[in-house]
Amino acid sequence: MTTRPTPDAARLLVDCLIEQGCERIFTVPGESFLQVLDALGQQDRIDLVTCRQEGGVAMMACADGAMTQRPGVAFVTRGPGATNASIGVHVAMQDSQPMILFVGDVDSEMRDREGFQEVDFAAFFGPIAKWAARIDSADRIPEYVARAYATAISGRPGPVVLALPEDMLSHDTSAKPRPRVERPAQAPCPDAMQAMMALVADAASPVAIVGGGGWNTKAREYFQLFAERLGIPVATAFRRQDAISPSSRVYAGNLGYGPNPKLVERVKNADLILAVGARLGEATTDGYTVPPLVAEDRKLIHIHPDPNELNSVYPADLAICAEMDEFAESAALWDDGDPIDFDAGAEAHAEWEAWATAHPADYALDMGQCVQFMRDTLPADTIICNGAGNFAGWWHRYWRYEGFPTQLAPTCGAMGYGVPAAVAAALRHTDRTVVAVAGDGDFLMNGQELATAVQHGANLIVIVVDNSAYGTIRMHQEREFPGEERISGTRLANPDFAALASAFGGWSASAATTEEFKNALIAAEGRSGLRLIHCKIEIEQLAASGATVSGLRDR
């Protein structure tokens, strides 16, 4: 049998990815990009991670981009593969994370005939991606790949989708990769910094809200220095809790779902909001009420790397378009004028410490005590990955997100994110402890990626919180239509999750009491590979905020 060489176009595409610094690709293979799979098999610079469903593929790529600040890269096939992967594109867009999804497409001769699994990908992904396009010419592969990277990492980071016609990947070409592109460095205007410091000096009760697109370790360190020097309380945006060290003397806690009521009042009553990197979206602001959308006696300084975000929803008294790390460094090193000193930062931090300390509750398996035990047992730089559901609130409230990154969680509230994100984190940070936390409904959205974890030797702990219900929806159901006879569509009949993990080749344990959880966690920490703890809790224990079924019914 004659051996066919790898086509030029496919080899060029892989070379372009290598030039841009791509180290890992997540995929479910498809016949529409066999040429690329062949080219990837002929090199050793890019690690190819074979996954079990395209939703898991895209969420792993999204999480990888969140950790590296370079686009996470995914390859899927046309039609069903691309539509399955669309959830990850949506997460990357709303989470402001860089990602590139390559989609194997129909042959050019079949286009616009509703060929097998054909979708107009530019039209389909256009509303949920920063850019969606199709590469029709092999000679232009370097142009499209470089532009995809530049688009994904610039301004507000986000996803790009590129369709690859099957025949194009077999074309001859002599084109060469373009040089690696970097995120533009945009420093804040000195006049704007002067105006900002004047507004801060005039304030009586300022609050900072931080975290979001373009945030990195440098931004974290410098902004913390700035905030501590002035004593400004610092709240983190929804699921951006690693944007500042929780041990900082000015850390005030997180906004979003289930925040400290004292922090909510502090933000509502602030006469100056300093929003740095945060979009001030619906989740962070509780429907644009924390802080109020418009307030005559309140000033807003909004700093964001994308000009399109400034004044788009919240009217800013001072809008500064700058990179987060460049702004934070300028703020930390600013030394022009009289010293500014607030005591509110220390007060807010003490309020958060009290709120974030779990007190024993009358449950056989007390989730607050479990998270607090985790905090005392696992390394401080443990990466916590979660999807969506009330279960996540126990970690949001009681875990300390020390180090960056330590929180991988979808701000868009997508279920099924935790396990794929944990696989990506375990492969990216082999020297750190990685924990996926999932509800029973959440886990079965992408639990199949346990197979990927085992296949690729990922070390991770999975904690499944099982109350046999879609708990978040049940909570809302009890608020709106209380009563046993009104429960509709939220009950779940679950498998034995511990047995399921064993079937995948992992270690597992079940816990129905707090003591059983503690013993299981200690046993899991002493092992490697896939480890899963199946936590069986009562539906009465609805949320970390203290919401209970009986309490909602008795209102």
Image (cartoon, rainbow, N blue to C red):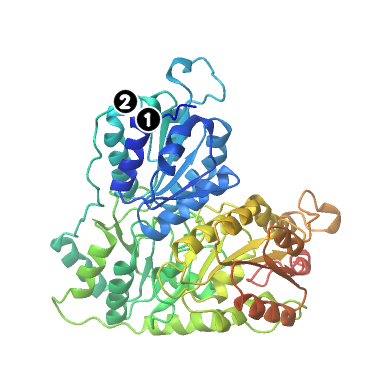
Q: Is residue 293 visible?
A: no
Q: Is residue 36 visible?
A: yes
- For residue 475, side relative to residue 420 (left or right): right
| Image coords of residue 413 (percent x, y) | 55, 54
| Image coords of residue 411 (percent x, y) | 50, 56
| Image coords of residue 155 (percent x, y) | 30, 50
Query: Residue 300 versus residue 179: which sits nearer the camera?
Result: 179
Determine whether 521 is above or below 120 in the image: below
Classed neighbour count for the residue bearing mark 1: other residues with Cα under 10 Å, few (<14), some (14–19), many (≥20): some
Residue ID at (56%, 84%): 376
Q: Earlier in the sequence, mark 1 or mark 2?
A: 1
Query: Residue 333 versus residue 20: which sits nearer the camera?
Result: 20
- The amino acid type, in three-letter code, at marker 2 is Asp
- For residue 221, side relative to residue 66 (left or right): left
Give the number of the disc on residue 48.
Answer: none
Residue ID at (48%, 72%): 432
Residue ID at (53%, 35%): 30
Determine whether 209 is above or below 451 in the image: below
Query: Residue 144 versus residue 222: which sits nearer the camera?
Result: 144
Given the current orientation, which residue lies at the most extreme front position? 1
Residue ID at (24%, 30%): 174
The quadrant holding residue 266 is: bottom left
Q: Are marks 1 and 2 in contact (CB under 8 Å)?
A: yes
| Image coords of residue 319 (percent x, y) | 26, 56
- The amino acid type, in three-letter code, at marker 1 is Pro
Q: Mark 1 — residue?
A: 7
Considering the numbered disc 1 on the image, is that residue within a helix, a strand or a loop? loop
- For residue 63, side relative to residue 249 (left or right): right
Separation (CA) of disc 1 from disc 2? 7 Å
Q: Mark 2 — residue?
A: 172
Considering the numbered disc 2 on the image, is that residue within a helix, a strand or a loop? loop
The quadrant holding residue 79 is: top right
